[in-house]
Image (tube, grey):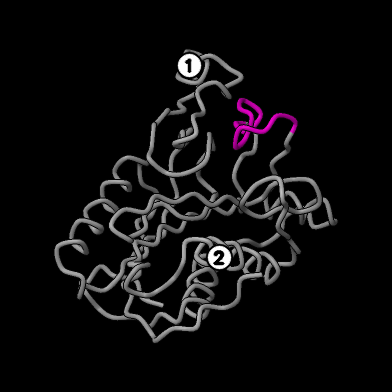
Amino acid sequence: MSQRINTLSRAGVFQDLGLLEYTTALNFQETARKEKIEDRTRPDKIFFVQHPSVFTFGRNGGQENLTRSEEFLKDRGVALVQTDRGGNVTYHGPGQAVLYPVVDLEQARIGVTDFVYGLEEIMGQTAKDFGVPIHRDPRNHGMWTDSKKIGSVGLSIKHGISIHGLALNVSLDLTPFSWINPCGMSGVLMTSLKQELKDRGLPDPPLPMESIKETLITYFCQWFHFHPVKESAHASLC
């Protein structure tokens, strides 16, 4: 089993992109990775974001796991985007907490398996803090509660530097997940922190996204031994 990363403290700039269209956020990540490739002394960047409704496809495909036509999805304002991350099809929408770490894994001596494990652990600790115990499942990377999936992980690694990251379902509308086979798996139900708390008898659970963000970033810093540095006036630091 993977353990907490044991490495020297690393510098990280944390930036909240707000609600931002998927391809624009991807451009931020790709630019940050290019800058890191050109100058490995630059601090790593970790972006927090929510996306308007979008289905993204990974290197393993995904178009074949749409259960509705592209016309149906377009009429409902759902974009379709091909990516270079691992995995299959997934959904992003408002109310989902997304963390994109642009991290020099090679320089930090963090293996990809350990990095994925750590991202899962961060989601697990965050969900627990908000009253929802979640766990891993051998069927698929990410995090689950009972037989339902609540968080996903997908990465792209080039020159030892990661982009993409984790997505934790907080309070988003789960309906669009019924229009795909999530992560390429048929018969899998998706859930959220809000839905799980409602099922436990809390009809309107308090889940402020700002608190979710701060919790995810705190655990990210703890797990991967990051410390904040200031790169610009727009940076939001842990």
Report whether 158 appears left or right of 81: left
Which amino acid does the dot numbered 1 rest on?
Glu
Q: Residues within 10 Å of mark 1 (few under 14, many from 20)?
A: some
Which amino acid does the dot numbered 2 rest on?
Ile
Q: Which residue is mark 2?
A: 212
Q: Secondary structure at mark 1?
A: helix
Report whether 197 appears left or right of 164: right
Outermost residue toward the bottom?
8
Residue 204 or residue 159, whichever sits in front: 159
Residue 181 in picture, x, y percent from top left: 64, 29
Outermost residue toward the left?
38
Report whether 10 appears left or right of 233: right
Give the extent of the magenta segment: 176-187
Residue 138 or residue 72, whichever sits in front: 138
Q: Which residue is mark 1?
A: 70
State yes or no: discs 1 and 2 in contact (Cβ < 8 Å): no
Q: Earlier in the sequence, mark 1 or mark 2?
A: 1
Whether the magenta-drawn stretch holds residue 185 is answered as: yes
Which label was assigned to residue 190?
none
Please determine whether, in this image, residue 24 is positioned above or below residue 127: above
